[in-house]
């Protein structure tokens, strides 16, 4: 088993690392405090080809794979999670549903701009009363002639209200199956469609430089041809999308965990107490050693999940494990890094304060830690 990156993967990692250190790190704190979306950074990621990493070249992509995307996400996550989640959601939730399940016509219409990063797509699954129970969908869509008429709402939707958002793909009840079960389908809703309203942005604890909104649909009409994939398969389609997304979130969480190590090692060399650097004290050394162990284990977990996914093997359990391990590592490392920094760790001017605020959502988004444990137990036959 080879756990080393290939030459091509390492070149990508260095390129993204350089971008994160030189372009993102110096300015992202100001965007974060202003709760402002970093359009130019996102545009540069588009020009670098990051949004097209897992997309075939004949569709305008880089011809890479999902592992390449995850490598980029880890490097971005080492510096900032807002930028990283913008890329993650833009790819795994925005364009991948169309890439995986769209018709040739849908791909031709939407993918070029999404792949180039000049436009962003969003994924409307979660609802105000649903949360982890995605099957509790209440949003409806009924066929009226050659149009879908959509009514309902979605909550906590990333990339849904930027100036460059072009679409939101939503899950909606389109009928009833035998036995009274809901028929759930996925439908593409272009931005600006009458009846589609984007609420003001949320006031969030973390990810403050990313875009998140509640959405509402009031007799919102879109063409029947905007149905994504097979009617009644929307829920199953998005479950598969979420499996892939959990590997990506695991890579992002690994980056945050590693970023906490990076900052703590640097600070342990610089900060002196009682006449010597705090890194000379065993209490600090042991704490950082544990942090590094968590980040290393988290990386191995997402590598293993990505390897199975790329090999076309079942990876649901491995994706859930990676997401669970990485979110725990991110949260634990953020707490420990803040402790190492002491009072400065409580100040927003230092990255670890931002890391601490950003880490918690990793235990919630794309399936809570409790959901991951449910999935793992289910895969064990329990």
Image (spheres, helix red, strand yellow):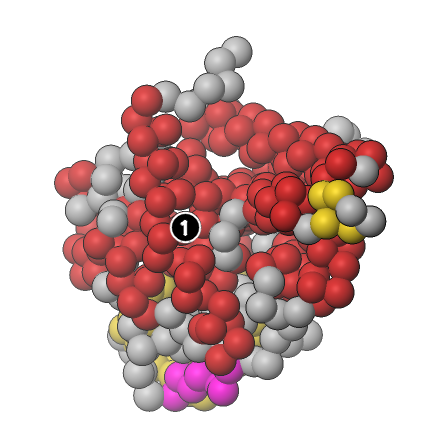
Q: Position of residue 139 (x, y in %)?
A: 54, 75
Q: Secondary structure at mark 1?
A: helix
- The stretch in magenta equals 195-201
Query: Which residue is depicted at the point 30% across and 26% down?
Result: 8
Q: Residues within 10 Å of mark 1 (few under 14, many from 20)?
A: some
- Locate residue 160 relative to residue 41 in the image: left or right: right
Q: Please identify the residue farthest to the top as the structure is shown.
A: 1
Q: Position of residue 147 (x, y in %)?
A: 31, 76
> In this orientation, which residue lies closer to the viewer: 290 or 379?
290
Residue 118's place in the image compared with 307, above or below, is below
- The picture quadrant where one finds residue 219 is bottom left
Residue 201's place in the image compared with 67, above or below, is below
Q: Which residue is mark 1?
A: 21
- The picture quadrant where one finds residue 143 is bottom left
Number of numbered discs: 1
User: Is 186 inside the magenta-drawn segment?
Assistant: no
Query: Which residue is depicted at the point 45% across and 73% down?
Result: 31
> In this orientation, which residue lies closer to the viewer: 280 or 378?
280
């Amino acid at each position: 088993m080879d756990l080393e990156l290939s030459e091509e993967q390492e070149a990508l990692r260095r390129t993204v690392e350089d971008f994160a250190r030189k372009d993102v790190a110096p300015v992202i704190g100001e965007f974060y405090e202003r709760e402002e979306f970093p359009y130019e950074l996102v545009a540069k990621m588009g020009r670098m080809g990051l949004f097209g990493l897992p997309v075939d070249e004949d569709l305008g992509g880089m011809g890479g794979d999902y592992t390449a995307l995850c490598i980029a996400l880890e490097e971005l996550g080492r510096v900032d999670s807002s930028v990283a989640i913008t890329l993650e959601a833009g790819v795994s939730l925005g364009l991948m549903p169309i890439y995986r399940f769209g018709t040739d016509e849908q791909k031709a219409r939407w993918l070029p701009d999404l792949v180039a990063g000049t436009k962003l797509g969003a994924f409307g699954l979660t609802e105000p009363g649903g949360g982890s129970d995605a099957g509790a969908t209440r949003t409806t869509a009924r066929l009226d002639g050659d149009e879908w008429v959509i009514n309902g709402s979605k909550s906590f939707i990333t990339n849904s209200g930027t100036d460059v958002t072009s679409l939101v793909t939503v899950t909606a009840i389109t009928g009833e199956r035998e036995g009274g079960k809901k028929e759930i389908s996925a439908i593409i809703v272009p931005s600006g469609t009458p009846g589609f309203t984007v609420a003001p942005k949320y006031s969030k604890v973390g990810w403050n430089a990313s875009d998140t909104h509640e959405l509402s649909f009031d007799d919102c009409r879109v063409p029947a041809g905007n149905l994504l994939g097979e009617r009644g398969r929307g829920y199953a389609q998005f479950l598969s999308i979420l499996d892939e997304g959990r590997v990506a979130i695991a890579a992002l969480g690994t980056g945050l965990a590693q970023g906490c190590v990076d900052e703590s090692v640097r600070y342990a060399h610089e900060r002196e107490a009682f006449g010597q650097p705090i890194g000379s004290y065993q209490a600090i050394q042991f704490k950082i050693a544990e942090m590094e162990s968590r980040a290393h284990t988290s990386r191995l977990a997402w590598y293993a999940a990505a390897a199975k996914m790329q090999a076309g093997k079942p990876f649901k359990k491995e994706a859930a494990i990676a997401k669970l391990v990485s979110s725990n590592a991110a949260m634990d490392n953020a707490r420990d890094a803040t402790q190492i920094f002491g009072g400065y760790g409580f100040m927003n001017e230092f990255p670890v304060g931002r890391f601490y605020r950003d880490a918690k959502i990793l235990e919630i988004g794309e399936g809570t830690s409790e959901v991951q444990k449910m999935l793992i137990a289910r895969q064990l036959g329990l």
